[in-house]
Image (spheres, helix red, strand yellow):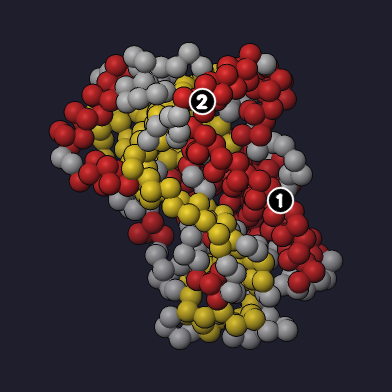
Amino acid sequence: MTRSDRPDVIIAGAGMAGATFALAAAQGGLKVVLVDPQPFSAQLAPTFDGRSTAIAYSTFRMLDALGVGEALRPHACRMDRILVTDGRRPGAATKAASSAFLRFDADEIGDRNGGEPLGYMVENRRIRSALAEAVTAAGIEVRAPAAVATVTPGPGGVTVTLADGTALEASLVVGAEGRGSRVRQQAGIDTVGWSYDQGGVVATVSMGRDHGNVAHEYFLPAGPFAILPLTERRASLVWTETSRRAEALKSASDAAFHAHLMRRFGDYLEDVTVVGPRFVYPLSLQLAEELTAPRTALIGDAAHAVHPVAGQGLNMGLKDAAALAEVLVEAMRLGEDIGSEIVLDRYARWRRFDNTVLTAGFDGFVRLFSNDAAPVRLARDIGIAAVNRIPALRKAFMHEAGGATGDLPRLLRGEAV
């Protein structure tokens, strides 16, 4: 590879965070290469990823700025209201709901967010498809299937050797390949974290009535149960159970799964039909101790993997992508070495505090609401009721969930890098 052919950045992982970062960096004039063990065609298969994602309104601005929003809008369902209820036992979602509840309404912050909803629910396969199309249209080089074997940083760049022996050179390597990041391992970056011994059972249902663009989240002792609105009068169900029960639900027959679902939540769900396959995802927390190493940066789940309780995992990862792209593009325009320690430290300082605080906050939230001890339940119900009665607090929560607070990268303000 000649010097003129050498990319500026090698991105390990062409999933949602990696592909979004590739588009952002390329928009700013950087030459990037995506490397992934799975070709795009495999990532778009209906059986690859059954989840749906709550995209914050600020994150959707970023996707619009990258030219991806238009392809997503037909598949994006507005979330105009979110209702949160604390329950005590199975069935609490309907008959025995706690009097403590939270109601978030987009109309309350419409004066500050231009009438946008609280967020948009989009199936992950739709996001992956739109990103794949945009990456292809941008002419970004994708090497897949290809896996990173070793990463060797040096004073003038980094050499990434693939499993087939191919060596690629660049100024920087970005680890975006998820919890088991090979780039993070090669950089010697340790992680802290733990398993929740829970599984998230994910299924899509066709609803017998209009969901009204309302998202529901019920907190039960085993974990949250969420009903998240999708287009075409469908909803994504995220049902948290112990790992053992979650696997049993996945392997149950369609009839048995439907019957159990109706026994637990039938009064609310009414006439629903499960469509497509069911999925189970083990739930855990993992936080990288550092975001950077020599010639290396981490984004997305490679840097922080959180419980889906607040639906913020992808939003955090895309904020990483926006911040890193902005730092690198500005450094390139100033003639700096984009892989140097001084440049990467700007990214780490920008994102470290936010990521750490949010990860710890979500963990505390899970532990608080997955606890049925009477004193804890009483305290949280009082807290929920208090927040629900104070408009300023509700608005603060909504702006935070919308990703519109703090030092925002330009892309999350809807501006080009």
From where the camera sits, is residue 116 visible? yes
Q: Viewer-nearest of labels 2 and 1? A: 2
Amino acid at the residue labelled 1: Phe
Residue at image point 40% right, 32% down: 221
- For numbered disc 2, what is the local secondary structure? helix
Looking at the image, the residue that sits furthest to the right is 334
Q: Amino acid at mark 2?
A: Pro
Q: Nearer the viewer, residue 180 or 120?
A: 180
Corner quadrant of residue 109 = top right
Identify the disc placed on residue 353. Answer: 1
Measured from the top left, where is residue 20 in percent x and y?
57, 54
Horizontal arrangement in the rendering, residue 85 relative to residue 262 (left or right): right
Point out which mark residue 375 bears: 2
| Mark 1 surroundings: few (<14), some (14-19) or many (≥20) residues within 10 A | few
Distance CA(mark 2)–CA(mark 1):
32 Å
- Decide if residue 404 is on the left or right side of residue 88: right
Seen from the viewer's position, the closer of residues 76 and 291 is 291
Q: Earlier in the sequence, mark 2 or mark 1?
A: 1
Instruction: For the N terminus, give its image quadrant.
Output: bottom right
Q: Is residue 53 left or right of residue 192?
A: left
- Judge whether residue 272 can be spotted in this image: no
Indicate which disc residue 160 carries.
none
Between 241 and 104, the one lying in front of the other is 241
2 and 1 marks in contact (CB < 8 Å): no
Q: Residue 112 placed where, x, y %?
A: 72, 25
Please tell me which residue is depicted at 32% across the width and 26% down the height of the picture: 90
Look at 15% across and 40% down and name the residue there.
Answer: 253
At 74% from the left edge and 54% from the top edge, which residue is drawn? 350
As drawn, 398 above or below 68: above
Question: What percent of the width, then of the height, locates residue 129?
Answer: 44, 50
